Every structure is written in C-alpha cells, then in structure tokens.
C-alpha cells in the first residue's frame, strides 16, 4: 500500500486523484484549508486522513507531513495540486494580486515539498507530481502572471529531478491543458478588477473566451486522475508529462518555434563568445 499526500484535495484534480488512489487500495493524506470539505467531497474511508493545510503556512506543512508519517509510516507520492489562476493583463494585475498568487502557486509548493522531502530522503524513494499547466510551457495574453508561476514550477521541478534522482526520488511537472474542471470559475480563478482599454483586443479577449469555454473544455478530469494513479508506477518517469491533446500540440509547436529561432539567430548567438584564439590564450 502506497501513501499519497495531496494538496488542494477537496475538489478538482486533487479530489479525483484521492478517490482513485483510495480505490486502488492506497492510503491518502488529503489536505485542504478545511479538512471537513475533504470528507464532504470524498467521504469517510479507513485509508483516508484529512488534514488541515494552508500551503502558504510552512509550519502547518511540516505538521501535516508529520501527521501523515505518524498515521501511515511513510509518504510515497506527493501531489502538489493546490493553486489557482489569475486572469488579466500583466499591467492590470496589482502587486497584492501577484504576491498572493505566488504565495500559493510557488512558495506554497516549495513549503510543502520541503516539508515532505526529509521523509522521502530517509526512505530513499518517492514520487513528486507538481501540477503545472500548458501555461507552464507557453504564456499568453491575459494569463501572463499565472503562467509565470507555472514557469517557476517547471524550473523548480527540473532542478528537483536532477537533485533527487540519485536518492531514488523522481519529480515530474504535470502539464494539463484545458480540462473540464472549475478552474475557470470564480472558485479557482481570480480576475483582476482593473481593465485597461488598450488591452481590449488581447487580454480583454481572453477574459471573454475564458467565460465562454468554462465547462466546455476538451479534457476529461477523470481520465487525467486515472493516468496519474497509473503513472506513479512508471520506472523512468519523464520530468514533464503533457496531458491533453492541446498540450501535446502546444509542446510540438513550442519545440518547433525554439528551433526556428536558433536557426535564424545562430550567427548572432555564437558571435557573443570570445574568439577562439582569445579563449585558448
């Protein structure tokens, strides 16, 4: 029996992953700011431990990890799922909005990871699944600040993968595209109240599209949750796991774009090195 530690487990991906892990016979430490909301969503289960956790509170993260180990003896899989979105042009977002977003999406992920890693290192085993996004692969008008938090998650995960592999611990950035969850609802998406007319055709258009596609996204959350429960058995997991046809297409387009830039600007890129004779001197 494996033990999962899942943040933001009262709804969305977190709740679905918890349910499928329990159905597979695993133990689940499901965390949320209000642990009763976890019970209300998932129900009672002998292998379920609902724990209060605000990911922005590092002391609470350590307490939650300790409670997990005291109950089940170990933590095998950490799912950093807690997070939310921010919609608005970069200039429209206030400093307070940006700081709050980073506290949850980046600093919160770091706090929980630092709390869990000592237990995984002691075991010399573990899996870390950091919920990133297609927005961690490419940014876009209206979601710039949100995407920047996911770019941070991608960078942290890549470093963690390199640091932890010799210890038998694997880290993966999970990159969902648009899935039919509540992400675009007010429960998961904050919208900057400021609206600047000059951004009407860019970030403003994204505001309109977000309302139109909410609950009409192509991705099936149930299928994603099952993929992740199966994925933790992979012997050589990738550092990035694209999920959704839209993320697969975006990955291919981004790779092609980067190669095109290198090809077009290679002469400029290499011109900044010291000349070969000077470098050898």
Image (spheres, helix red, strand yellow):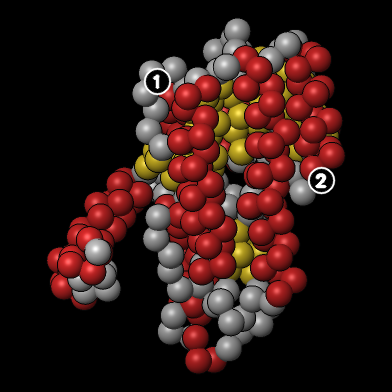
| Residue 117, image x, y percentages | 65, 29
Q: From this viewpoint, is residue 225 visible?
A: no
Residue 234, numbered label: 1
What residue is rendered at 56% in x and 77% in y? 90
Whichever of labels 2 and 1 marks the residue nearer the N terminus, that label is: 2
| In this picture, residue 133 sits left or right of residue 68 | left
Q: From this viewpoint, is residue 177 visible?
A: yes
> Foreground residue, 21 or 231?
231
What residue is rendered at 60% in x and 59% in y? 85
> Foreground residue, 276 or 88?
276
The kind of secondary structure element at disc 2 is loop
Q: Quadrant of residue 121?
A: top right
| Residue 68, image x, y percentages | 76, 21
Residue 213, numbered label: none
> Foreground residue, 164 or 133?
164
| In this picture, residue 260 sits left or right of residue 117 | left
> Foreground residue, 17 or 1?
1
- The quarter of the rendered structure image containing the N terminus is top right
How far apart are the two marked residues, 2 and 1, measured between alpha carbons? 32 Å
Image vertical order of residue 33 relative to residue 164, above or below? below
What residue is rendered at 66% in x and 59% in y? 102
Image vertical order of residue 91 relative to residue 78, above or below? below
Q: Quadrant of residue 72?
A: top right
What residue is rendered at 30% in x and 51% in y? 251
- Mark 1 crowd level (few <14, some 14–19, many ≥20, 10 Å Cα): few
Q: Quadrant of residue 279?
A: bottom left
Residue 57, numbered label: 2
């Amino acid at each position: 029996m494996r033990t999962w530690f899942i943040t933001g487990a009262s709804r969305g991906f977190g709740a679905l992953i918890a349910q499928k892990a329990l159905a597979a016979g695993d133990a689940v430490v499901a965390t949320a700011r209000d642990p009763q909301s976890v019970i209300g969503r998932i129900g009672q289960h002998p292998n379920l431990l609902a724990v209060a956790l605000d990911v922005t509170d590092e002391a609470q993260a350590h307490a939650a990890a300790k409670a997990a180990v005291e109950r089940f003896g170990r933590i095998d899989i950490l799912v950093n799922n807690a997070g939310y979105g921010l919609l608005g042009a970069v200039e429209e977002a206030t400093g307070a909005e940006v700081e709050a977003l980073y506290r949850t999406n980046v600093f919160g992920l770091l706090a929980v990871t630092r709390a869990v890693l000592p237990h995984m290192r002691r075991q010399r085993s573990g899996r870390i699944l950091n919920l990133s996004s297609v927005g961690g692969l490419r940014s876009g008008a209206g979601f710039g600040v949100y995407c920047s938090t996911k770019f941070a998650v991608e960078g942290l995960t890549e470093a963690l993968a390199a640091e932890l592999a010799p210890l038998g611990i694997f880290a993966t950035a999970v990159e969902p595209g648009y899935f039919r969850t509540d992400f675009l609802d007010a429960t998961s998406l904050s919208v900057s109240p400021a609206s600047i007319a000059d951004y009407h055709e860019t970030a403003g258009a994204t505001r309109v599209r977000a309302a139109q596609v909410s609950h009409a996204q192509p991705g099936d959350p149930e299928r994603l949750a099952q993929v992740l429960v199966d994925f933790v058995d992979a012997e050589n997991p990738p550092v990035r796991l694209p999920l959704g046809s839209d993320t697969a297409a975006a990955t291919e387009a981004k790779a092609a774009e980067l190669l095109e830039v290198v090809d077009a600007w290679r002469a400029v890129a290499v011109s900044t090195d010291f000349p070969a004779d000077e470098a050898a001197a």
